[in-house]
Image (spheres, coloured by chain):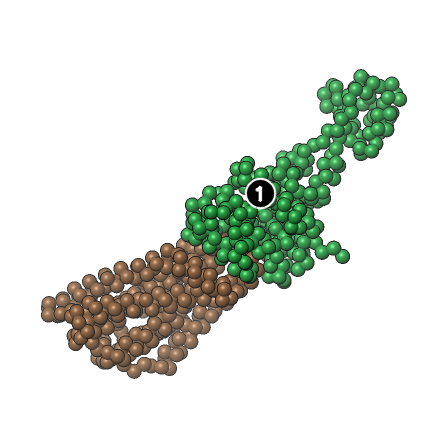
């Protein structure tokens, strides 16, 4: 049986009468870079907090690296690195002192590991500065460093690129991809930057008002929404033929184009049928929605 | 646990709050010294002499100065420091967001809770030890030492005049560091409980202090004489018993146990709340 790095079953959290997370069942597979998407107030942070034992679920089950929470919370968190909301530090201490404090709670960390991690997050040379003088982006990087120090198998990151400049976002994106590909880390991240999620995540979950709307690969979500744009010499007649004759899901957008939602494997047959009916087919092209388009449609923004 | 405790002590030593508390006590002692000097001048019609030597046979010597200073400091200034130090322990971390960072590490909530409580205990002890030692030092250097004469009066310690020889009195001051710490732990634990209940350190410290002051005042008003034995603030006064010529051991132990009981109750209540608390900060 597969041991999922993260597994939740019917996870629910109710605050007074408001249900923040409603029967959420997630399965994050080993090696996934898993994007967790939802609007503000959709329940992302509450879910992340339940995954890390900060918030007690009202009902349901959470398992982290095969350990049940909250019963085996300590064992579960031993190989987990996390950032929840904006990374918080002791401002009167240096970056290195902060890292030492947090890493001491996990166990021994070899001295070279500090240097290595600081280099990864591009903070070498600034580790002896007080965190008070760090910029938002530097704090974000330090947060990532503290999450990476215990050599985790699973990273849980809440908006890891929040506040970073484009260069910083790019570096962190590359770092996350490297960690997943070269070190085999499983990464669970929430983000508002949908194009970033589309670029680095292989699987995603979308939640709205605490309920799961979609869970699966980014590719299958994009493919499920794949449409073909068709331009023929007689748009209206072609529309009638496809919708009434072939009973295919087709719709018009303006006077010149038809949009057909069929699997890619069927498009050649559709083309043959149109040509067979005497239509001149000028264009058939893939029309893929972006993750952002699909996300906005699903969450009804 | 030891690693966590070491880190907590490191954080405490690097925090301004601790040094601010020490500074507040130093200022208080200097103010007390001025007050003590002018008071003794007034009481003796200008005859009193502060000796910059070891010996000062007068009633107004360094030991009585330390006793008065400790007595008055216990009324409010030390409780303020204790409430702030203990009240910021968890609420301060919650406020700054570091509590959630700590709790995403593999440390049990109870270990974190008791680690932070032990840090509070250590800070209360060090605060009090510093205060008594600093008073004695100021007393020795600026007032001069002698025997500790006790009279019925504002200290409300003895019914008839008594005297503690200088060495015995010094030993009693050592005892008072421990009885004082034990007594103040009741307030520190209350502030610690508030620190779990509130996520704002100012609210936590202020609530604990308000309760302390309120119960203290109630305990002094005759209307509430029936209520007085049940107030923890009444038992907290036991720390001074060590200055009586004959230490009433049974009474001291009884009231120390009651203080301990209050502390344990507050501590366990805080633990139950902390274990169940959703960390949303």
Q: Quadrant of residue A200?
A: top right
Q: Please state which of residues B53 and B214 is positioned toward the viewer in this rendering.
A: B53
Q: Is residue A230 left or right of residue B68?
A: right
Q: Please state which of residues B277 and B52 is positioned toward the viewer in this rendering.
A: B52
Q: Please state which of residues A100 and A71 is positioned toward the viewer in this rendering.
A: A100
Is residue B198 among the parts visible in the rendering? no
Percent from the top left, x then y, of residue A291?
67, 36
Q: What residue is at 57 percent from the left and 56 percent from the top?
A: A150
Above or below, comparing residue A84 to residue B180 in the picture: above
Chain assigned brown = B
Chain assigned green = A
Q: Please state which of residues A181 and B10 is positioned toward the viewer in this rendering.
A: A181
Of all residues, the one furthest to the top in this rendering is A233
Which residue, given by chain and number where applicable, does mark 1 sit on?
A: A172
Q: Crowding near pointer 1: few (<14 within 10 Å), some, many (20+)?
A: many
Percent from the top left, x then y, of residue B230?
40, 71
Q: Quadrant of the C terminus of chain A?
A: top right
Percent from the top left, x then y, of residue A248?
82, 29
Q: What residue is at 39 percent from the left and 71 percent from the top?
A: B182
Read off the chain for label 1: A
Percent from the top left, x then y, of residue A169?
56, 39
Q: Is residue A254 left or right of residue B115?
A: right
Above or below, comparing residue A247 to residue B178 in the picture: above
């Amino acid at each position: 049986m597969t041991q999922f790095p993260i597994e939740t079953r019917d996870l629910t959290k109710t605050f007074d009468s408001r249900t923040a997370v409603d029967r959420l069942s997630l399965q994050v597979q080993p090696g996934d870079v898993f994007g967790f998407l939802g609007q503000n107030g959709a329940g992302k942070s509450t879910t992340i907090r339940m995954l890390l034992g900060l918030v007690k679920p009202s009902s349901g089950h959470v398992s982290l690296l095969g350990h049940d929470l909250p019963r085996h919370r300590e064992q579960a968190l031993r190989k987990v690195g996390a950032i929840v909301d904006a990374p918080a530090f002791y401002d009167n201490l240096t970056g290195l002192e902060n890292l030492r404090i947090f890493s001491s709670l996990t166990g021994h960390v070899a001295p070279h590991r500090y240097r290595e991690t600081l280099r990864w997050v591009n903070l070498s040379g600034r580790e002896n500065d007080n965190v008070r003088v760090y910029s938002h982006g530097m704090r974000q990087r330090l947060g990532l460093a503290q999450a990476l120090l215990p050599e985790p198998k699973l990273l849980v990151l809440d908006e890891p690129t929040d506040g970073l400049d484009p260069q910083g976002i790019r570096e962190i994106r590359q770092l996350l991809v490297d960690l997943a590909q070269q070190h085999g880390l499983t990464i669970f991240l929430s983000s508002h930057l949908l194009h970033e999620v589309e670029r680095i995540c292989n699987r995603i979950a979308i939640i709205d008002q605490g309920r799961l709307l979609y869970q699966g690969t980014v590719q299958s979500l994009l493919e499920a929404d794949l449409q073909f744009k068709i331009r023929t010499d007689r748009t209206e007649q072609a529309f009638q033929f496809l919708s009434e004759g072939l009973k295919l899901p087709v719709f018009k957008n303006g006077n010149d184009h038809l949009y057909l939602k069929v699997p890619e494997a069927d498009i050649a047959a559709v083309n043959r049928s149109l040509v067979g009916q005497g239509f001149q087919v000028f264009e058939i092209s893939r029309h893929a929605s972006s993750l952002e388009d699909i996300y906005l449609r699903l969450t009804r923004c | 646990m030891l690693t966590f405790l070491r880190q907590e002590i490191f954080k405490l030593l690097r925090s301004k709050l601790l040094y601010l508390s020490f500074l507040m006590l130093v200022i208080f002692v200097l103010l007390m010294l001025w007050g003590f000097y002018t008071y003794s001048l007034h009481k003796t019609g200008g005859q009193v002499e502060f000796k910059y030597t070891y010996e000062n046979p007068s009633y107004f010597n360094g030991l009585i100065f330390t006793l008065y200073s400790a007595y008055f400091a216990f009324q409010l200034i030390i409780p303020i420091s204790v409430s702030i130090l203990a009240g910021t322990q968890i609420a301060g971390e919650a406020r700054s967001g570091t509590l959630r960072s700590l709790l995403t590490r593999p440390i049990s909530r109870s270990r974190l809770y008791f680690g932070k409580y032990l840090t509070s205990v250590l800070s209360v002890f060090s605060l009090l030890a510093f205060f008594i030692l600093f008073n004695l030092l100021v007393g020795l250097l600026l007032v001069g030492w002698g025997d500790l004469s006790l009279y019925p009066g504002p200290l409300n310690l003895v019914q008839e005049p008594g005297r503690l020889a200088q060495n015995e009195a010094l030993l009693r001051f050592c005892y008072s560091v421990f009885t004082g710490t034990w007594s103040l732990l009741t307030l520190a634990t209350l502030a610690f409980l508030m620190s779990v209940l509130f996520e704002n350190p100012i609210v936590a410290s202020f609530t604990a202090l308000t309760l302390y002051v309120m119960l203290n005042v109630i305990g002094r008003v005759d209307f509430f004489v029936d209520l007085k034995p049940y107030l923890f603030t009444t038992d907290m006064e036991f720390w001074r018993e060590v200055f009586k010529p004959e230490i009433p051991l049974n009474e001291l132990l009884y009231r120390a146990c009651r203080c301990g009981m209050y502390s344990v109750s507050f501590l366990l209540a805080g633990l139950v709340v902390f274990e169940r608390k959703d960390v949303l900060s």
